[in-house]
Image (tube, rainbow, N blue to C red):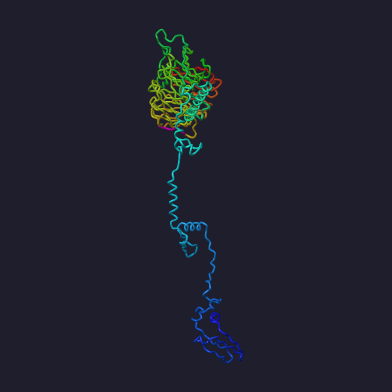
Amino acid sequence: RLLNSAPTPSILAGRGGGAMTLHKQNPANDPSAAAAKPKGGALMLMNNPKKSTLYEPIQGPQAAQDPNSRALAKPIIKPEANIHVDETTFHEQRTTFQRTGRAQAPDAEGTVITRTTLGYDPKRLEYFEQQAEQARKRPRFEGKDALVEGSDDEAVYGVWGPPSREETWNAENALSDVQKGVELAPEQIAEREYIAERNRQKGLEEEQEKEPDMDRLVERKMSHLLPPRLQGDDHKPMEPLTTFHGDEEFDYKGNSWIAPPAGLGTVGHLDMDHHKCFIPKKCVHRFTGHNQGVHRIRLFPKTGHLLLSAGLDGKCKVWSVEKRKVMRTYVGHSAAVRDVQFNHDGTKFVSASFDRYLRLWNTETGQVLQTFTNRRVPYVVKFYPHDDNFFVVGYSDNKIVTYNATTAEITQEYNHHLGPVNSIIFVEDHGTKMITSSDDKKVLVWEWDIGVPIKYISDPTMHSMPCLAVHPAGLYFAGQSLDNQIAVFQAKDRFALQRKKKYTGHQVSGYACELTFSPDGQFLVSGDGNGKIFFWAWKGHRILQKYRGHDKGPTTGVVWHPLEPSTLFTCGWDGVIKMWQ
């Protein structure tokens, strides 16, 4: 290499004794050159340049043609290995480079690449911001306002220009033919009347859609079992009608026909010695007069000389037990009567019907004193024991409502049941607490006039109890359970279920068959879904007697006469009221 980069010597080859002599072409120009002579047949170097001389650039015109010249040699760049850059990083660095002119190279040293100033405008970002600001300030036309104003728009835009404000105002305030006094043709008048009636009907339909039928909402689970709902606010009950069937309404002494006959005594509370009761042995009379079945019967308070019946034909009748005939008929309902109840002196009674109305009647004259409704079906009605001016009603919308009999106003609502209320009784201190049963399989205990129950009686094994009855002693009450047995509960303190007191043997599943106690508390009597009558011993829990009471359906009502110790009245869907002694 040193020889190649050295100046080119002139080689004079000579073979003399096997030695080669190297002679420089001009040794006089190089002071360091020395003559070399062959010694002993060896090759001798005649010129020995220094190292610094070897690395000096070649001088003279031959440098331009010397292929070994270092001045013209290009630097040798070794190819680097391929470097992988993921797409996300590439786009980030590319965007950064475009916005700021700086980017990071994908090498291990973290080299920063800077944009050259050639062809780069540092104010390019400011131009972009100015253009965006101008676009934001550009006015936008929103809404339905006319884009062009003035009367000469047509000259500029042609017939396709938007209407001016003048044209819009004139079109909105133009007078119709009727306002101008132009007579319309009969066809036009008929068409206008048709459109007006159509719009009126459409408006009524929209109002009904906006205000859903509350009757359907609260009774949706059993609407197929209930009578039609009251349509409109102007719905009115039927006109009442009464008929007296007796000989005279007043006797020669001036006493009314509802007055108890002379000679009727009174019986003390649980008078076992002088008023011991016995099981009736046979049917001694049949009261007939209802066109359909009889759902409930009630005896006149304390004396029991009159019998009140609620028929499925929508009529109520009062019968004389002594004369054994009907005395007065009360017609005031367009559907079956569900329940009836005397007040505590018998001068008035309330009837609850499936036509969604309750009516307060004067027993003697048959006059309707008040009419009540809240557009629901009343199932049971009871007078408050301490004040005849108030009575409570159990409804199909799961509520119990207290009415003022004088003003027909609702004074209290009890709303904790989850199903229609079927039965109401009063216990403790002659009626300070109220017990209700419902289809939700619960029994609730309430304080009078307080809308929150004080006791829940509920158990997974319990069934619905559509009828309740209080024992004459006031310590227990019995419920007609729909699992074909009679359950007994305490009527005070804890209101606990008496599991040892269970009365079975009858079939009442699916029917609201009433039950009652004998006045001395020895016997428990109940109707049956097959029309039978069952008698149980209160203490022994065994069946003492059963009779075939009614045909064509269940025995729905039973009442024991308060004075006569062995007289019982029953009713059923065959329309007959039977007297047993």
Coordinates of residue 203 in the picture (x, y in percent): 48, 27
Depicted 6 relative to depicted 86: above or below? below
- The N terminus lies in quadrant: bottom right
Q: How many marks?
A: 0
Residue 544 shows in this picture = no
The image quadrant that residue 348 belongs to is: top left
233 vs 462, nearest the viewer = 233
Residue 117 shows in this picture = yes
Outermost residue on the front side: it is 155
148 vs 263, nearest the viewer = 148
> Is 528 situated left or right of 445 in this image?
right
Q: Is residue 179 one of those drawn in magenta? A: no
Coordinates of residue 69 in the picture (x, y in percent): 53, 76
Depicted 167 relative to depicted 287: above or below? below
577 vs 238, nearest the viewer = 238
The image quadrant that residue 166 belongs to is: top left
Q: Is residue 457 one of those drawn in magenta? A: yes
Q: Which residues are magenta?
A: 454-458
Coordinates of residue 34 in the picture (x, y in percent): 52, 88
Please, what is the dominant secondary structure of the magenta stretch?
A: strand
Coordinates of residue 310 in the picture (x, y in percent): 48, 19
430 vs 236, nearest the viewer = 236
